[in-house]
């Protein structure tokens, strides 16, 4: 694990996931951490040198000053890794809020990435009362999330037995339990506290990244799962329409956690998309 400074007094934990080839920077979803993408990176290691990082408030990266969870900070984290590691024209992958982060980083500094592959990036065309209402269960669910377990194995068995994480590939779930919990005097505790996760979801409703999608210079794949309850097909299509060079890719058997569910399927799609970029 490496350490790099970002904005707002944040020091990022950066993870070298290995591989050979051009750099691929991988951004995780809210509530997770960089190493959760290790099983996916392993399937790309013969084509890319994969890097990940713990976004602010996640994993081994601390919270921003004043607990400011404005989503512009997540784009700052992306650019901090690109600059700090000297990644020249890397490829980029982002899942959910991680997708929003890499898109906004490219929009704010066009030409940073060679190409992007974003699975259900949280970039809303418009914030409506209906959308806000639909996100309330997600926020309340985060606040109620159990954050303490006797052991990592107890945490693994709990998540594997019920929604929303029971659909994860066993390797991805194990990586999450390994990287997402810290030892505590009472057992193991989530590194991303429930109140932080909920605050990030709230700020996602005021994120203005959609207004900057037209500034993205590189080719982009917007991917979504047909089983997803988090992202409507119309929203994904609106993102594609707003981007200068984008295509839509749909996965019939995957939900919102697709990159942690269908590892081989998603890895194959990333390979194909970047081969044509």
Image (spheres, helix red, strand yellow):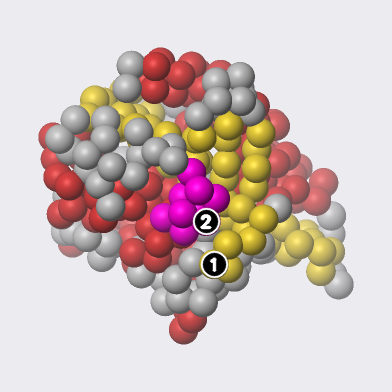
- Which segment did they paint magenta? 79-87
Residue 73 visible here: yes
Residue at horizontal 55 percent and vertical 20 percent from the top: 47
User: Label 1, on which residue?
Assistant: 5
Residue at horizontal 81 percent and vertical 69 percent from the top: 184
Percent from the top left, x then y, of residue 169?
A: 63, 29
Residue 220 left/right relative to 92: left
Residue 190 left/right relative to 49: right
Disc with the residue nearer the chain's start (1 vs 2): 1
Percent from the top left, x then y, of residue 254?
A: 45, 26
User: Quadrant location of the C terminus?
Assistant: top left
In the image, which is nearer the foreground, mark 1 or mark 2?
A: 2
Mark 2 Cα-neighbour bin, 10 Å: few <14, some 14–19, many ≥20: some
Residue at horizontal 26 percent and vertical 35 percent from the top: 218
Q: Quadrant of residue 63?
A: bottom right
Can you say whether 20 is above or below 50 in the image? above
Percent from the top left, x then y, of residue 65?
A: 49, 81
Mark 1–mark 2 distance (CA, rounded to whole Å): 8 Å
Q: Secondary structure at mark 2?
A: helix
Mark 1 Cα-neighbour bin, 10 Å: few <14, some 14–19, many ≥20: some
Residue 194 visible here: no
Which of 146/3 is in front? 3
Q: Is residue 146 magenta?
A: no
Task: Assess whether mark 2 and mark 1 are in contact (beta carbons under 8 angstroms).
Answer: yes
Can you say whether 194 is above or below 172 in the image? below
Can you say whether 185 is above or below 257 in the image? below
User: Label 2, on which residue?
Assistant: 84
């Amino acid at each position: 694990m490496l350490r790099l400074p970002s904005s707002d007094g944040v020091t990022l934990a950066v993870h070298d996931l290995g591989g050979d080839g051009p750099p691929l920077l991988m951004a995780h979803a809210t509530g997770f951490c960089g190493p959760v993408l290790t099983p996916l990176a392993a399937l790309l290691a013969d084509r890319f040198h994969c890097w990940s990082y713990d976004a602010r408030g996640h994993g081994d990266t601390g919270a921003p000053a004043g607990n400011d969870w404005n989503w512009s900070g997540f784009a700052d984290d992306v650019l901090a890794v690109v600059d700090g590691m000297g990644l020249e024209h890397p490829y980029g992958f982002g899942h959910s809020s991680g997708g929003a982060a890499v898109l906004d980083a490219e929009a704010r500094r066009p030409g940073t990435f060679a190409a992007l592959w974003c699975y259900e990036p949280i970039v809303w065309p418009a914030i409506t009362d209906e959308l806000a209402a639909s996100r309330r269960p997600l926020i309340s669910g985060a606040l109620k999330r159990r954050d303490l377990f006797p052991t990592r194995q107890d945490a693994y068995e709990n998540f594997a037995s019920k929604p929303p994480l029971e659909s994860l590939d066993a390797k991805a779930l194990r990586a999450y339990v390994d990287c997402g919990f810290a030892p505590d005097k009472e057992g193991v505790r989530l590194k991303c506290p429930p109140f932080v996760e909920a605050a990030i979801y709230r700020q996602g409703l005021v994120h203005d990244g959609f207004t900057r999608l037209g500034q993205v210079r590189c080719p982009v794949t917007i991917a979504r799962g047909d089983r997803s309850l988090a992202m409507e097909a119309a929203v994904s299509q609106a993102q594609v329409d707003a981007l200068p060079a984008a295509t839509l890719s749909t996965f019939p058997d995957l939900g919102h956690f697709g990159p942690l569910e269908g590892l081989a399927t998603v890895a194959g799609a990333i390979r194909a998309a970047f081969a044509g970029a």
